[in-house]
Amino acid sequence: MNKNDEAPTADTVEANDAEGRDFPESTSCTIILPQITPQSKNILRHIRTGHANAITRRNLIQATGLPDRTLRLEIEALRRSGTVICTSGRGYFIPQTLEELQGFIKQEERRARSTFFTLQSARKLAEQMQQQGEQVRFSEVV
């Protein structure tokens, strides 16, 4: 087995509330992640379960000691590997209820639609530029 074929490792992240009290056994979760980094483990130790216990990015930066960009890249990597980390106006959290998860899904779908429409405009401009030999001026587009 080469390095890229290694089996995922299992890490249990203990869920606790803002005061550090443990949640009942039924709310703990096991997260299977390939090659979880020490930075990711550190981040997951500080992200609480439930919207009411969300941690702001600023507080997460202070708690982990990570630079903002590194923190965002690590959270993106965790999400891409299957860890559901929600965001809201309150900060980052692990969903505790179906309602919290569905709210996050709707939020991200709205964001994706907005990005899609932005890309449609950019593609339209690129097509115009190709047709006119890259001679399109901004005043012609508006």
Image (tube, rainbow, N blue to C red):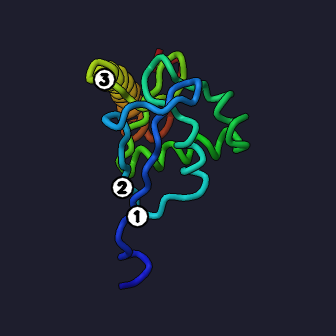
> Residue 119, image x and y in percent?
38, 31
Instruction: Work out whether 103 lies above or below 66.
Output: above
Q: Residue at x 64, y 46 (%)?
A: 70
The percent position of residue 12, horizontal first and vertical second, equals 43, 51
Which residue: 55% across, 58% down? 37
Tell me the element at label 3: loop
Q: CA distance from mark 3 to mark 2?
A: 20 Å
| Residue to which mark 3 is pinned | 97
Amino acid on which disc 1 is placed: Thr
Label 3 crowd (10 A; few <14 / some 14-19 / many >=20): few
Which label is found at residue 32? 2
Horizontal side, residue 93 vs residue 28: left or right = right
Task: Give coordinates of residue 72: x percent, y percent.
Answer: 57, 40
| Residue, disc 1 | 9
Whole-number angstrom distance, CA of label 2 to CA of label 1: 6 Å
110 to the left or right of 67: left
Give the residue drawn at x 35%, y 85%. 1
On screen, 85 above or below 74?
Answer: above
Distance in Å between CA atoms under marks 3 and 1 = 26 Å
Up-down relation of residue 20 to residue 99 (above or below): below
State yes or no: discs 2 and 1 in contact (Cβ < 8 Å).
yes
Q: Secondary structure at mark 1?
A: strand
